[in-house]
Image (cartoon, rainbow, N blue to C red):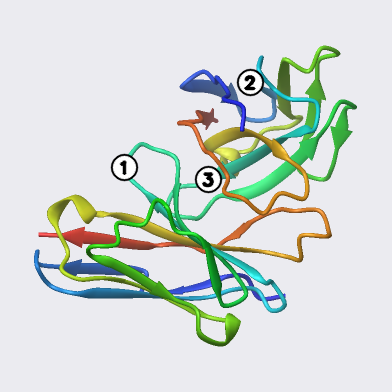
């Protein structure tokens, strides 16, 4: 079974530029998460989707961050414009139907460097 | 979700058992103990979870104290590939909510 796929793996941009990250979850997983991980810290949730619906985006900085999950499968996270403090690893995870035991399966992440 | 406390770092010799402790004194009755690990440049990986009984799978064993206020993750024969940051998390089962990661324990396995 293929895991969670993310691209790109690395991205270097200058501040004020836009950037987008893409995630394809494990097939059949209805729940999708975007986390941000700062250096030396554990991941922190940005947004959670149940199918197409964003059910928890309370930690998403909405002035510059946006996300979408069209058709309830893959998802895109965008930052516009990027700031120096946005340098981090952006992780995507997915989990199966909530009626079964829950584990979250993480992708390898996208390491963003803002110069 | 309850908070957890873990030592920031530990060392273990290759081939020996690695015992990683976690304190979760405010755990609720419906909350499970989960362990994830994160190898350098990879996303976190699920290891094991349990409620109150000891659990074992192909990766590790989980020992939870009778009062459920602490637990220990055991890697019975650590290898160099087990070098990673290990996160102890408590959350309710069937909860699709976020995982709340602390700073974890950085385990260094040495030859």
Q: Earlier in the sequence, mark 2 or mark 3?
A: 2
Frontmost residue, B110 versus A88: A88
Distance Cα–Cα, label 1 vs label 3: 13 Å
Q: Nearer the viewer, mark 2 or mark 3?
A: 2
Q: Which residue is mark 1?
A: A39
Q: Secondary structure at mark 3?
A: strand
Pointers 1 and 3 in contact (CB under 8 A)?
Answer: no
At 66% from the left and 18% from the top, the residue drawn is: B26
At 57% from the left and 35% from the top, the residue drawn is: B87
Judging from the image, mark 1 belongs to the subunit labelled: A
Q: Is residue A26 visible?
A: yes
Q: Residues within 10 Å of mark 3 (few under 14, many from 20)?
A: many
Q: Which residue is mark 3?
A: B38
At 29% from the left and 56% from the top, the residue drawn is: A61
Q: Is residue B98 above or below residue B66?
A: below
Q: Are marks 1 and 3 on the same chain?
A: no
């Amino acid at each position: 079974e293929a895991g969670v796929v993310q691209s790109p793996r690395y991205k270097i941009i200058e501040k004020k530029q836009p950037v987008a990250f893409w995630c394809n979850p494990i097939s059949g997983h209805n729940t999708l998460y975007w986390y941000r991980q700062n250096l030396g810290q554990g991941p922190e949730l940005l947004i959670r989707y149940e199918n197409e619906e964003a059910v928890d985006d309370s930690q998403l900085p909405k002035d510059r961050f946006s996300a979408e999950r069209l058709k309830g499968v893959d998802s895109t996270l965008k930052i516009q414009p990027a700031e120096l403090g946005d340098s981090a690893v952006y992780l995507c995870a997915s989990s199966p139907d909530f009626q079964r035991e829950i584990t979250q399966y993480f992708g390898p992440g996208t390491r963003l460097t803002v110069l | 979700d309850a908070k957890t406390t873990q030592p920031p770092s530990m060392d273990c010799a290759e081939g020996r058992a690695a015992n990683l402790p976690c304190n979760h004194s405010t755990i609720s009755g419906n909350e499970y103990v989960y362990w994830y690990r994160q190898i350098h440049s990879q996303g976190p990986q699920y290891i094991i979870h349990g409620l109150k009984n000891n659990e074992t799978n192909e990766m590790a064993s989980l020992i939870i104290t009778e009062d459920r206020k602490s637990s220990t993750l055991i890697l019975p024969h650590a290898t160099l590939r087990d070098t990673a940051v290990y996160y102890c998390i408590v959350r309710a089962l069937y909860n699709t909510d976020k995982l709340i990661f602390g700073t974890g324990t950085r385990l260094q396995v040495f030859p």
